[in-house]
Image: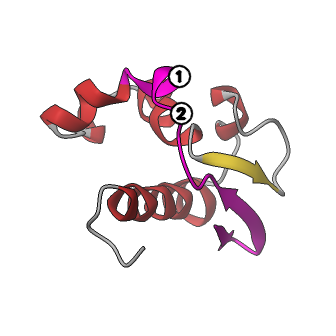
Amino acid sequence: MDVTVNGRRVTLRERLPARENWDLMKGFGEGVDLQHMTFEQATDIFRRFVESWEFDGDPADVESYAPLDMFREYLPLMQAVSERITELMGGGKN
C-alpha cells in the first residue's frame, strides 16, 4: 500500500509476520498511548509498517525518523500507519 507523505512515496507493508511482531500484542491489547511513550518507543511501533520510502535513511531504523519534519512528515506518516493498523485489525475498508 503506497501513501504520499510531503510529496514522497512511502510503501506500507501488507502484512506483519506474527513471530517478529509478537511484542506489539501487549501494546494493542492495552491501547497504544503515544503521549506517554518516548520517541523511540512510539517510532518502533510504526516503523515496522514502513517497507520502503523516498526519505533518507533506512525506514527499519528508528533513528532514520529523527530528522523528519514533525508536522509535514512524522505526524502524517504516523497517521498513515495508524489508518493501516485500523484496516488490518478489521476496522477499515480492506
Residue 28's quadrant in the figure?
Answer: top left
Q: Nearer the viewer, residue 24 or 34?
A: 24
Give the label on residue 17, or none.
Answer: 2
Does residue 68 appear to the left or right of 88 in the view shown? right
Does residue 17 appear to the left or right of 66 in the view shown? left
Residue 37's quadrant in the figure?
Answer: top left
- The image quadrant where one finds the C terminus is bottom left
Q: Measuring 53% from the left and 33% from the top, which residue is drawn there? A: 17
Q: Measuring 58% from the left and 56% from the top, which residue is drawn there? A: 14
The image shows residue 68 at horizontal and vertical percentages of: 67, 49
Q: Residues within 10 Å of mark 1 (few under 14, many from 20)?
A: few
Name the element at disc 2. loop
State the count of labels.
2
Name the element at disc 1. helix
Is 93 colored magenta in this rendering?
no
Q: How is the image coloured?
A: secondary structure
Q: Residues within 10 Å of mark 2 (few under 14, many from 20)?
A: few
Whether residues under marks 2 and 1 lie with C-beta atoms below 8 angstroms apart, the answer is yes
The image shows residue 56 at horizontal and vertical percentages of: 85, 45
Residue 47's quadrant in the figure?
Answer: top right
- Which residues fall within the magenta stretch? 1-23
- Three-letter amino acid code at disc 1? Glu
- Three-letter amino acid code at disc 2? Pro
- The image quadrant where one finds the N terminus is bottom right
Q: Measuring 81% from the left and 52% from the top, which residue is drawn there? A: 55
Does residue 32 appear to the left or right of 80 in the view shown? left
| Residue that carries the numbered disc 1 in the rendered image | 20
Q: Measuring 76% from the left and 75% from the top, which residue is drawn there? A: 7
The image shows residue 80 at horizontal and vertical percentages of: 50, 64
The residue positioned farthest toward the bottom in the image shown: 93
Q: Nearer the viewer, residue 22 or 4?
A: 22
